Amino acid sequence: MESVTIKLDLAKYRRIELSKEKAIELLNILLEEKSKDEVKEALRITENFNIFYDMMRRKQRDYIPLPHDYSDLLKGDVSIDKIRLERRGNDSIVVLVFDKRFPLEDLSRLLKEIGYREVKIENLF
């Protein structure tokens, strides 16, 4: 398969853009490893893409914030911070924004597990 890029923003949050199918695959693997509320919610949103995409457009939101347990926030044990749904032609694209403390090595490993051969890391600043 092709390559994927992990984009790091100024605050070091990790952003990846995946097709809906690849995002579901990645979130299922992550859910097996870390059964967190934000991962469950991200999976629910992705599986119900059309409903949440319409809601985002109606409410004019760019991202959907995910619920976090405050103790996990303090410990730095948060996986996904927020999610964005996009349509590009007939393609359904899911943008997952991982917390800045989520290890890049783990994210690269997860992406390779779902079939990407090359994982690039790009700074956006």
Image (cartoon, helix red, strand yellow):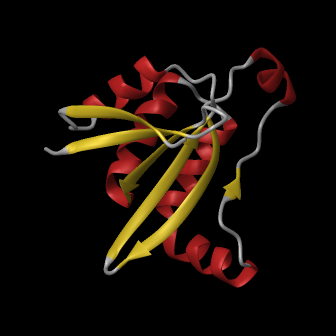
Looking at the image, the residue that sits furthest to the front is 125
User: Percent from the top left, x then y, of residue 75?
Assistant: 77, 15
Instruction: Name the foreground residue: 23 vs 5.
Output: 5
- Whether residue 103 is situated above or below residue 125 in the rendered picture: above
Nearer-the-camera pick, 26 or 76: 76
Please name the residue shown 65% across and 66% down the image. 62
Height in image: 12 above or below 66? above
Tell me: 25 left or right of 99: left
- Residue 98 image position (x, y, % from top left): 57, 37
- Dividing the picture into quarters, in which one does residue 35 lie? top right
**Viewer-proximal residue, 10 or 89?**
10
Side of 118 where 4 appears, left or right? right
- Residue at 43%, 75% (x, y): give it: 87
The quadrant of the image that shows the C terminus is top right
In the rendered image, residue 113, in percent from the top left (x then y), is placed at: 27, 30
The quarter of the picture where residue 100 lies is: top right
Q: Is residue 103 above or below residue 113?
A: above
Q: Which residue corresponds to the image point at 83% horizontal and 20% vertical from the top-left?
A: 74
Q: Name above or below for residue 11 compared with residue 88.
A: above
123 left or right, relative to 3: right
Q: Camera-side residue: 101 or 92?
A: 101
Count of all numbered marks drawn on residues in the image: 0
The residue depicted at 71 percent of the width and 70 percent of the height is 61
Quadrant that contains the N terminus: top left
